[in-house]
Image (cartoon, grey):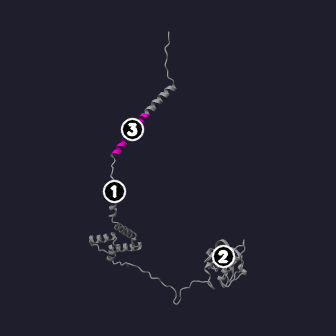
């Protein structure tokens, strides 16, 4: 007896068949989409409006004429007026003046007799609410000047002239010395002022310039001068007594102030002998 042949499919064959069918379907869908897109694009190109060179030239001429006919001067004038009016400050009455006006209105209302007409009371309130301060102040008898001028008062005693600008004694200090009154700069002393005196601040500055010129390579060159112009000597927080005409020559890579103009109150509290004003004069030469 002959046996029948069995046809069977394995798992791998089944998977391969299903994948092949899916690929065929996907390719068909893509082909359909591409065909419709190509069809629509051709229709759009066919329906597009085409202009002749003469029509394009006329359109450009029309645009040029329209731009030339625009009222540019008028637009600039309007813009300028808006800018000018926009910059004007709105002047308002101070809060104190408005408060006084309010009190005046209340007093006026209280002073109305009991048989005063409602229209009279209503009219006064309407004026107040509308904030027409010019008319309202005239009605209630309040006068506010349009412009208030505050003259400058001269409190000096009679015969006393204005104090002249303070200057250093002696010849004028050259501009290159950058002289500063009531100033003390810090720095490394290249020439001690205790044994180095000059007749004037100008001479002290010149000594600093000469020192910088004569300095040998590797030596510190003077770029700061500090001079004591006070006849009674100059204060310093060190142990020495600094006398008139002392000329200190110093060097600093970045000059830094010790004191300027006045000693602070805190400093004078901790240094009772310190004066109020810095007595030294100094300058930085470059």
Q: Magenta stretch: dominant SS?
A: helix
Which quadrant of the rendered structure holds the C terminus?
Answer: bottom right
Question: Of 261 and 124, which appears nearest the observer?
Answer: 261
Marks 2 and 3, the one that precedes in the sequence: 3
Residue at screen point 38% across, 41% down: 38
Q: Residues within 10 Å of mark 1 (few under 14, many from 20)?
A: few
Task: Identify residue for label 1.
Answer: 57
- Indicate the position of residue 174 as horizontal and vertical percent values: 62, 81
In the structure shown, which secondary structural element does the residue marked by tag 2 occupy? strand
Residue at screen point 32% across, 55% down: 54
In the structure shown, which secondary structural element does the residue marked by tag 3 occupy? helix
Q: Between marks 2 and 1, how big is the CA–CA gap?
A: 78 Å
Closer to us: mark 2 or mark 3?
Answer: 3
Task: Identify residue for label 2.
Answer: 224
Residue at screen point 33% across, 59% down: 61
Residue 179 visible to an observer of this rendering:
no
Residue 25 visible to an observer of this rendering:
yes
Picture quarter containing residue 282? bottom right
- Indicate the position of residue 7 as horizontal and vertical percent values: 49, 19
Task: Identify residue for label 3.
Answer: 35
């Amino acid at each position: 007896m002959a046996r029948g042949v069995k046809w069977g499919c394995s798992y791998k064959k089944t998977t391969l068949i299903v994948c092949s069918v899916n690929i065929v379907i996907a390719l068909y869908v893509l082909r359909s989409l591409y065909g419709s897109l190509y069809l629509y694009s051709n229709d759009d190109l066919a329906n597009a409006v085409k202009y002749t060179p003469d029509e394009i030239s006329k359109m450009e001429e029309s645009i040029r004429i329209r731009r030339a006919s625009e009222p540019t001067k008028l637009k600039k004038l309007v813009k300028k007026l808006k800018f000018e009016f926009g910059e004007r400050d709105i002047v308002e009455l101070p809060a104190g003046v408005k408060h006084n006006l309010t009190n005046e209105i209340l007093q006026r209302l209280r002073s109305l007799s009991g048989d005063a007409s409602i229209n009279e009371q209503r009219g006064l309130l309407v004026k107040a609410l509308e904030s027409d301060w010019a008319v309202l102040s005239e009605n209630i008898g309040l006068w506010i000047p349009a412009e208030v001028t505050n003259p400058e008062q001269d409190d000096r005693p009679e015969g006393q002239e204005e104090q002249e600008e303070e200057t250093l004694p002696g010849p004028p200090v050259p501009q290159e010395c950058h002289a500063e009154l009531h100033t003390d700069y810090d720095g490394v002393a290249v020439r001690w002022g205790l044994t180095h005196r000059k007749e004037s601040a100008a001479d002290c500055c010149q000594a600093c310039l000469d020192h910088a010129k004569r300095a040998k390579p590797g030596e510190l060159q003077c770029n700061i001068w500090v001079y004591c112009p006070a006849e009674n000597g100059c204060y310093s927080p060190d142990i020495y007594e600094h006398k008139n005409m002392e000329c200190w020559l110093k060097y600093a890579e970045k000059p830094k102030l010790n004191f300027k103009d006045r000693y602070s109150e805190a400093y004078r509290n901790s240094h009772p002998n310190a004066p109020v004003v810095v007595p030294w004069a100094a300058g930085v030469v470059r």
